[in-house]
Image (cartoon, rainbow, N blue to C red):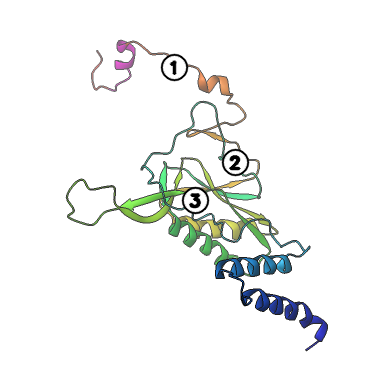
Amino acid sequence: MNSTFMSPFRSYFSQWYLHSIPLPGVAKSPRSAVLLSFQRSKKISQTSERTFSSTSSLSSWLAPKRGHNEKNRKGRPRMRTGGSTKGTTVVWGDYGLRLRDHDRRIAAKQLQIAADAIKMRLRGQRYRLYTRVCANIGVYTKGNEVRMGKGKGSFDYWAARVAVSRVLFELKGDLHEQIVRDAFRLAGNKLPGLYEFVRKGDPPVMGITKVEVGTNLEEMQRPRIRLPMDVTAGRIPATTPP
């Protein structure tokens, strides 16, 4: 092996060995020796090269970084009816998968299975998959036939609160639309709820109403007129006239 390549390691181990051996007549704790060796190894390991990604390798969209120290409440996703259409359109990709029935609490394992189904269908293709949700809600369970009280229970799995009309996955790449539809169909079969296929540029959704060309925000936010009872009762079909 090249001696120039091994010279930094030889100097490092020689310095660590010299600092780890206490000198005669000098009281030196093992903790200080270990700390000094760690500092020297840290200086040697530092390089000027930048890593491939600036995101930490420990971060994941299927589990939060903070852990499950605080127990989350079950909660319910909010239905945006005050004018917000955030998360209902395709932003980064060309196609998307959107929830259309009602809000759900989807487990991280189910999201992972759906993502794997998309990747398996599109294997060999050039594409990029974007995830628009994050499993950051802890679900805690208790055993069967357990009496009430004595805490919330132990941690079971991570889940994501997905509101209605929320985009879960996006795809971008040189792909045919029918292939993307089939991949999203397989992913929707793995997830609870009903889903729809959306393209980039489709109208956003406020609540469960699509904000299309003929619909404006002021018309959707105006209060509805309460009709009198005789008018609403007259709309009920009957066999004989009143």
Which callout, 2 or 1, points at the residue further toward the start of the chain?
A: 2
Mark 1 or mark 3, whichever is nearer to me: 3
Residue 39, given in percent of the width and then of the height, sits at 67, 65
- Amino acid, disc 2: Thr
Residue 241 lies in what quarter of the image?
top left
- Residue annotated with mark 2: 89
Whether residue 193 can be seen here: no
- Give the Cα separation between the discs numbered 1 and 3: 45 Å
Whether pointer 1 and pointer 3 mark residues with C-beta atoms closer than 8 Å, the reply is: no
- Amino acid, disc 1: Arg
Q: Is residue 76 shown above or below 18?
A: above
Which callout, 3 or 2, points at the residue further toward the start of the chain?
A: 3
Mark 2 neighbour class, 10 Å CA radius: few under 14, some 14 to 19, many 20 or more: many
- Give the Cα separation between the discs numbered 3 and 2: 29 Å
Residue 208, given in percent of the width and then of the height, sits at 47, 34
Helix, strand or loop for disc 2: loop
Question: Looking at the rendering, in which quadrant would you find the N terminus?
Answer: bottom right
Range drawn in magenta: 229-237
Which callout, 1 or 3, points at the residue further toward the start of the chain?
A: 3
Q: What numbered label is drawn on residue 66? A: 3
Residue at 30% across, 53% down:
141
Residue at 66% across, 73% down:
19
- Magenta span includes 98: no
Q: What numbered label is drawn on residue 224? A: 1
Give 44 or 47, whichever is nearer the viewer: 44
Give 235 or 131, whichever is nearer the viewer: 131
Residue at 25% across, 22% down:
238
Left or right: 36, with 113 as reference point: right
- Give the Cα separation between the discs numbered 2 and 1: 27 Å
Give 71 or 188, whichever is nearer the viewer: 71
